[in-house]
Amino acid sequence: MKRFALVVICCALATSAIAAPKPCEELKAEIEAKIQASGVTSYTLEIVTNDEVHDKNMVVGSCENGTKKIIYQKNDR
């Protein structure tokens, strides 16, 4: 019974660690790497508060417990 309780506690701790919110700069760097890997060269990624989001289609990430968003804009040449 003690082993079962230990397994349950370990699973609960592992789940909370996986669901931990990412810092905005770390998430932005991950998104930037994916964009560059797909060959896009002229773009802008910006971290903004939820109030500053005007077009939800531009949102590519959410960070800091959902209080901020990362928006993407492709720059035309």
Image: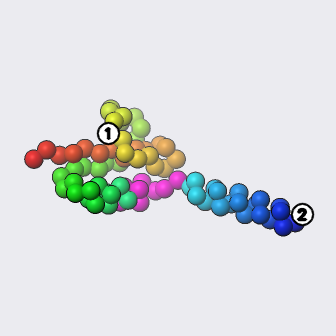
Identity, as a three-letter code, of the amino acid under mark 1: Met
Residue lying at the far left in this picture: please name it: 77
Residue 74 in the image: state x and y as whole percent. Answer: 21, 45
Could you say whether the residue bearing mark 2 is in a helix, strand or loop? Answer: loop
Task: Residue 1: give its label.
Answer: 2
Residue lying at the far front in this picture: please name it: 38
Does residue 48 appear in this view?
no
* Residue ID at (64%, 56%): 15
Does residue 42 appear in this view?
yes
* In this view, 53 is above or below 28: above
State whether the magenta stretch is mostly helix, strand or loop: helix
From mark 2 to mark 1, how far is it between C-alphas? 50 Å
Check residue 41 for magenta coloring: no
Identity, as a three-letter code, of the amino acid under mark 2: Met
- Compared across the picture, whether 53 is left or right of 76 comes to right
Residue 2 in the image: state x and y as whole percent. Answer: 87, 66
Q: Callout 2: 10 Å neighbours few (<14), some, many (20+)?
A: few
The range drawn in magenta is 21-29
Task: Residue 42: give its label.
Answer: none
Residue lying at the far bottom in this picture: please name it: 3
* Residue ID at (29%, 50%): 45
Q: Which residue is mark 1?
A: 58
* Residue ID at (32%, 61%): 33
Residue lying at the far top in this picture: please name it: 54
Q: Using the image as rendered, state which of residue 39 and residue 70 is in the foreground.
A: 39
